[in-house]
Image (tube, rainbow, N blue to C red):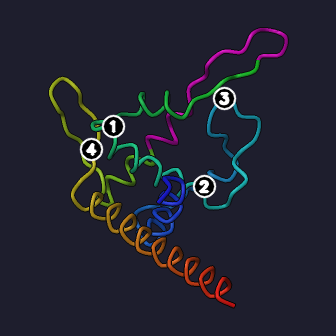
Amino acid sequence: MKVQEQIIKTSEELKKFEEIKAPEWAKFVKTSTNRARPPVEEDWWYIRAASILKKAERLGPIGVNKLRMKYGGKKRRGHKPARFAKASGNLLRKLLQQLEKAGLLKQQAKGTHKGRMITPKGKSLLSKISQNGHRGNKKEETRKVETTISTATK
């Protein structure tokens, strides 16, 4: 299963959690200073939450500043050369707090690094979604093979 598909399916699952809700102001806010407009998709809050959950699983203890760097991008400054701009910390902080309240992340230190790490509940959510996706892909592949065999025999 592709990571992008897994994030979309995880966002659908996160909509079922009552702790994770987009604030009223989320419709009007940009995700970074380098963006021209707010996100177009209505459920972008849940997609970003799923993406953060996936990044927390992969990168270990992760904090707001590291996420600001990951979600940042090139800021165009007119005739001056473009520079890197960090993403909005407020959005990421609120999402991390909501994921922590839902029990999917927890604050923890690992050696000298401290931040939020994925909990067993969050890990099981991601693994359940990836396993269901792999099963679905195998069914589609067998259907494709069966249709090609049946058309070849005719």
Q: Residue at point 68% right, 28% down? A: 34
- The stretch of residues the image draws in magenta is 77-93
Marks 1 and 4, how far apart at CA: 9 Å
Whole-percent x and y of residue 83?
Answer: 66, 15
Please tell me which of labels 3 and 4 falls first in the chain.
3
Tag 1 residue: 59
- 3D distance between C-alphas at marks 3 and 2: 17 Å
Magenta stretch containing residue 10, yes or no?
Answer: no
Q: Are marks 3 and 2 in contact (CB under 8 Å)?
A: no
Q: Say few, some or many: other residues with alpha carbon within 10 Å of mark 1 (under 14 / 14 to 19 / 20 or more).
A: few
Q: Secondary structure at mark 1?
A: helix
Q: Amino acid at mark 1?
A: Leu
Q: State which mark lies toward you, 1 or 4.
A: 1
In the picture of the structure, the residue carrying the numbered disc 4 is 117
Taking 141 as reference, is 48 above or below it? above
Residue ID at (45%, 48%):
95
Q: Give me the residue at 75% from left, 10% from top.
A: 81
Q: Nearer the viewer, residue 141 or 131?
A: 141
Say which residue appears at 40% left-offset and 49% top-offset. 54
Sooner in the amino-acid sequence: mark 2 or mark 1: 2
Which residue is identified by label 3?
A: 33
Q: Earlier in the sequence, mark 1 or mark 3?
A: 3
Say what amino acid the circle numbered 4 marks. Answer: Met
Amino acid of disc 2 = Trp
**CB atoms of marks 3 and 4 within 8 Å:** no
